[in-house]
Amino acid sequence: MTVTLRLVLAALAVFRTAQFLAYDEGPFGVAAGLRNLAGVNDRGENGLPRRALGRLFECPYCLGAWLSLGAAALVLLPTLAGDAVLVALAIMGAQSSLQDYSRRGG
């Protein structure tokens, strides 16, 4: 697999993982539970989560910045297992993008 293909897969993977962690309930409530542990629902008087980790999990852009570090490692240090993770998450990212596109009427 070329580096260019790995970069495209990594971008889709980071997009979907950030969306999943920030917005989705997830199977068995996994993502919602992670957000709860991070403190997303523990809000101060200003309406923002009290803890920095809670604010991170509330923002898909912030999550994407941190997740991209792991994705960069998978791109720059390729392994069969890492490629499998990138491909699986990238397929999820592509599906999510297509779903959003089709909801808007394509």
Image (tube, rainbow, N blue to C red):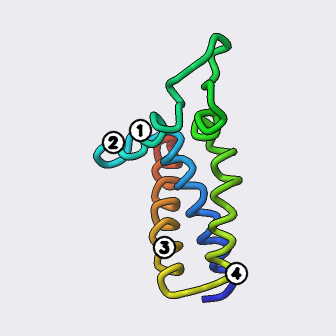
Name the residue located 68 percent from the left edge and 45 percent from the top edge.
Answer: 61
**Height in image: 47 above or below 11?**
above
Of the two numbered discs 3 and 4 on the same chain, state the one appearing first in sequence: 4
Q: Earlier in the sequence, mark 3 or mark 1?
A: 1
Tag of residue 76: 4
Q: In 3D space, how far apart are the residues under numbered discs 4 and 1 (Cα atoms)?
A: 31 Å
Quadrant including the N terminus: bottom right
Q: Characterize the local packing of mark 4: few (<14), some (14-19) or many (20 or more) Cα atoms within 10 angstroms.
A: few
Amino acid at dot 4: Leu
102 sits left or right of 6 in the view: left
Pointers 3 and 1 in contact (C-beta within 8 Å) = no
Residue 56 or residue 27, whichever sits in front? 56
- Residue bearing the label numbered 3: 85
Kindly indicate whether the residue at mark 1 contacts the one at mark 2 (C-beta within 8 angstroms): yes
Disc ID at residue 32: 1
Q: State the residue position of label 2.
A: 29
Kind of element beneath mark 4: helix
Image coords of residue 62 (percent x, y):
69, 45
